[in-house]
Image (cartoon, helix red, strand yellow):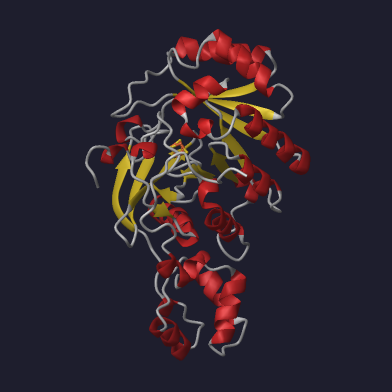
Amino acid sequence: MKPQTKPNEREPVNPTNDDQSQHDLKGMSRQELSELVVRFDQKPFLAGYLFSFIHAKTVAEIDQITPLPKPFRQQLIDGGYSISRLTLVETFTDPDGTVKYLFELPDRNRIESVALSDREGRRTLCLSTQAGCRMACSFCATGKLKFERNLTAGEIVDQFYQAERLGGQIGNAVYMGMGEPFDNYEPVLRSIRLLNDPDGRNLGQRHITVSTCGIPEGIDRFAGEDLQVRLAISLHAPSDAIRRRIMAVGKSWTLEEILGAVGEYQKRTGRRVTFEYCLIQGLNDSDDCAGKLIGRITGIDAAVNLIEYNPHPGCDFVPSGTQRIERFQGLLAKAGIETVIRYKRGQTIRAACGQLGADRLGKNK
Ligand code: SF4
């Protein structure tokens, strides 16, 4: 079997940040909280208070979980347990209403999350799953940053809690920020279950989308989870030759392997998928490319998001013009493929798709 991760061989400094996560109550499942409570010779039902105060009331301190006996709270604190919280460094707001949050992790690494609002004011949060990314897609600013480490489940859900605290209710979570979710599989799955828990934030599974750059083993594994979460696949090319030019992951897995995994996923789950396709002038936006893409995905129950390429420093690609994007869309529509065009959002604050981390390029921080 090919490695689950990899295009970029750089090793993480601290791949999981285990020391911190083992004592972070925010990243613990209900089962783990129950076991912890029992280990401290407390009544098992107290685990319910721990969970709901952390994930529904989103308290920041153990001492704020007042239904717990005071001595037990102190025992937890003395035992090194805490409720992790990201530090907000800066909030950026685009005139189109997009908001980017820059957070600092306890080890000083920085990540970004983006809240997008639709016309009705409903907010969707784009979550990061890693500090940096190993996948090194050439059109993406995050892929040019040094990979630092995986985020813990607590750090992933806290982006959501903080964005709600800072800007109001969030209706959807999309795992499309910094990092490849299937390269940090366990914490990502754990974070989904935490967000979805009825005694916590209770975010509906159909309001959650996980986006992968196309790791077949991850897609297979995801198909076996008992979840109704949506799956998106970043395709971005109709042929392996073009894909390899823009996505290092294209050297590890062919389109046939990826689409084969998607087919199996659909057989097992019966769920529709979304393909992401970023249009870059002269590279993947010709009529011929549209024809090849149609040939590749016909027969798969899928919608295609056509994304306008978002420029950033250090990358010479040029976005396809509106006419070309609409022409491409027309060809797909004619073939019966549902498409949505995603025009630039959050451009002035570098919050658009593929721009996360762009502020740090060349600054070495
Ligand atoms: S597009 Fe996604 S997978 Fe590719 S480098 Fe950027 S964050 Fe990583």
Using residue 130 as the reference point, say whether residue 296 is left or right of it.
right
Using residue 242 as the reference point, say whether residue 317 is left or right of it.
left
Q: Quadrant of residue 61?
A: bottom left
Image spot of residue 37 (x, y percent): 56, 82
Foreground residue among 53 and 2: 2
Image spot of residue 161 (x, y percent): 45, 57
Residue shown at 62% from the left, 32% from the top: 274
Residue shown at 67% from the left, 17% from the top: 295
Foreground residue among 22 and 24: 22
Q: How many numbered callouts?
A: 0
Image spot of residue 52 (x, y percent): 55, 70
Q: Using the image, determine if residue 324 lies above or below residue 86.
A: above
On the question of residue 337 being in view, the answer is: no
Residue shown at 60% from the left, 57% from the top: 196
Image spot of residue 23 (x, y percent): 45, 73
Q: Quadrant of residue 172?
A: top right
Residue shown at 55% from the left, 80% from the top: 36
Q: Quadrant of the N terminus?
A: top right
On the question of residue 3 being in view, the answer is: yes
- Figure quarter occupied by ligand 1: top left
Residue lying farthest to the front in this orientation? 1
Q: Using the image, determine if residue 333 lies above or below residue 30.
A: above
Q: Using the image, determine if residue 340 lies above or below residue 62.
A: above
Using residue 298 as the reference point, say whether residue 325 is left or right of it.
left
Foreground residue among 157 and 200: 157
Q: Quadrant of residue 353?
A: top left
Using residue 12 as the reference point, say whether residue 264 is left or right of it.
right
Q: Using the image, determine if residue 55 lies above or below residue 278.
A: below
